Amino acid sequence: MLPEQLDLLYAVGRPSPAPDGARVVVAVSHPDLDEDRYHGDLWIVTVADASARRLTSGPRDSAPAVSPDGRRVAFLRAGESGPPQLHVVALDGGEPRALTDRPLGAGAPTWSPDGRQLAWSARVPEPGRYGTGDADDRTYEPDAEAPRLVTEFGYRMDNLGPTRDRRLHVFVGDVPDEPPAPGDPAPTGAMEVRRLTAGDQDDTDPTWSPDGRLIAFVSARHQTRESDLRSAVHVVAADADDVGTDTIDTATAATGGDLSVSGVTWLLDGRLAVLAADVGPTGLDFVGRPTRLWVTTSTVSSGDGAFEVRPLTAPDGLDLDGGPGGLTRATGSLLVRDLHRGRMRLLRIDPDTDTAPEVLLDGLVTTDHAASTDGSTVVVSAGDHARVGDLAVVRDGSAAWLTDVSARLRDAGGLSEPIEHEAVGSDGAAVHGWVVFPDVEKYGEGPHPVLLNIHGGPFTQYPAGFFDEAQVYAGAGYAVVLCNPRGSAGYGFEHGRAIRHAMGSVDADDILTFLDHALTDERLDGDRVGVMGGSYGGYMTALLTTRTERFRAAIVERGYLDANSFVGSSDIGWFFPRQYHGSRDAAVEQSPIRHVDRVRTPTLVIHSESDWRTPVEQGQRWFTELKLRGVPVELLLFPAESHELSRSGRPRHRRQRFEHILRWWAGHLPVG
């Protein structure tokens, strides 16, 4: 893969099946290098014959939700500029109707059981901020807004900015009875909406009770919410008119611990199923804590106060994915994603029995899933090394592909399949991962120069599926080594917790063990090795260069480099270093900046100027310290980008990033 092929990265989003499962609506998106933006359309796919037709034409359509009667599709549409707004269109086609016109846009919609209403979360700006002031009053211009008075730790978030003056709250709106027929003009005018929640917290993931009377959502409304990571599920009456906190009931309370909730759905009998991690008595013990599945011990109704939950999965064994769309009801069972040895399995779990989860799909990287109303049709968006993300129906333990949006990327050639490896360290610990080789026809059998890539997190994993980084580097002639050392997700509780209060210890040992194992392959040149990584990967890259001079060069990207200054500058600084390092003294000692005087390796530092996860001062200081010591070093800064540059930054910035990376390696680790 080449950097200029980024706009071939087509992928499908979360599927939404019609009630009978016969048709599925899905958003298809891709980067557009010419226009320097992302484009998204909605498509309808027929399951029986895998035929597809376009339902909408963007420019940025996403988050489709088919109505319970199967006649309409609610979705988000963003124009050339401005935030996404709710729209609705007939499933058979026609002109979409705009339903909202909120200053900061709307979130993904969810239908009421009777198909008459939608619920969603949306940010509510303080008067006068974010363009809500008088256009003629210059005091409301962005640069002239009043100062923000900060009194708590959590006041901003990477890739978003300040949050306390634009909190997320739950809204409900009545959907017009009939969408326009094909060929008819769309009615104009936004629908009337009701705001159901208020307060100085974010209320997310609204979901309707089976009878349509209640809406459950995730929020942190407890007294100590400013100093811990706990959150809970709450319920509010769907017909509530008062947005005061007296309308909110706590629906879940952890038994024997404290939960940080990431997802919720209702069971048909009125109980709630919850995705959450137990963060312990302090509410901050998050390191290596797997997301688990829980269910309330009784049905939930408004006004009953807190409900106990019981776990359906053990603290060791499964690492459930708590990301968006990670939990779906399929009639009486639940669908979840499990991070497992570099893959993401799709599991079905019965909430009423102790039977082991049923593995519906394994071997692919399942990114999202959904089910028909009766649970008989399960569709997924999934990928492998040559599919960024395609729609498939699950049949007999395998995926029957319904789309092939990655066909143009495959036809362009140059994609390599990761080869699975496992190494064993001196302490007997197994380290699992992958090696991606360059194309033999273009670059021969080797030995090839090697790029050791280190993932972020650290509680995440390198997957077996499509990874643009590995494909671009292999496409340039490098053998790419990727592993999941201790501290990574997907290998059990002890594996994930192994580096708690010991960052840069066994994880560094595992990475070097895996590299040495990979280098026993004669196709890899052990004398020509570079190292690179972002975020925690940037931390580990920098740390390794303080301990060894074996690498020809290094790339430290959005690195976590000094725990001391990170505490006061990062959006997660107030809790992250203490939990991973232990004491403040340990955090200082385990920080790469503490040992920067030992570095001799030429280094390219890459950072985004608007990164609030690992703030730009981290990269700037690493560059300056190396420059002062005469180490060959460059600093590449991207304006107006966040921590997510490599994944969702402006398409042209993503291409330019790859071009600079390949330029650096061509100078320090030439191919051939």
Image: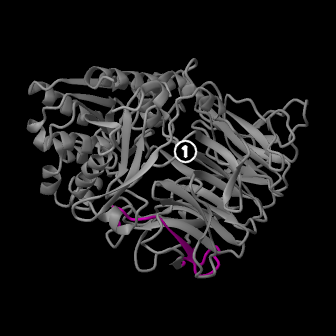
Instruction: Answer with the quarter of the image where residue 124 lies.
Output: top right
Quarter of the image for the C terminus: give it. top left
Outermost residue on the top side: it is 34
Q: Which residues are magenta?
A: 283-307
Instruction: Answer with the quarter of the image where residue 196 lies.
Output: bottom right
Left or right side of 26 for 431: left
Q: Is residue 194 above or below residue 360?
A: above
Left or right side of 56 for 318: left
Magenta stretch: dominant SS?
loop
Q: Is residue 302 magenta?
A: yes
Q: Is residue 82 above or below residue 215?
A: above
Q: Is residue 257 above or below residue 659?
A: below
Q: Residues within 10 Å of mark 1 (few under 14, many from 20)?
A: many
Instruction: Answer with the quarter of the image where residue 553 lies.
Output: top left
Count up the numbered dots. Answer: 1
Residue 434 appears at what percent x and percent y? 41, 47
Whether residue 310 is visible: yes
Q: Amino acid at mark 1?
A: Arg
Whether residue 284 is visible: no
In this rendered view, identify the residue nearer to me: 70 or 282: 70
Residue in view at x 36 percent, y 65 percent: 224
Residue 211 appears at what percent x and percent y? 76, 69
Tell me the residue that label 1 is attached to. 123
Residue 489 appears at what percent x and percent y? 40, 58
Left or right side of 36 for 191: right
The chosen color scheme is one colour
Residue in view at x 83 percent, y 58 percent: 20
| Callout 1 secondary element | strand
In this rendered view, identify the residue nearer to me: 26 or 382: 382
In this rendered view, identify the residue nearer to me: 482 or 22: 482
Residue 664 appears at what percent x and percent y? 30, 23
Q: Is residue 592 magenta?
A: no
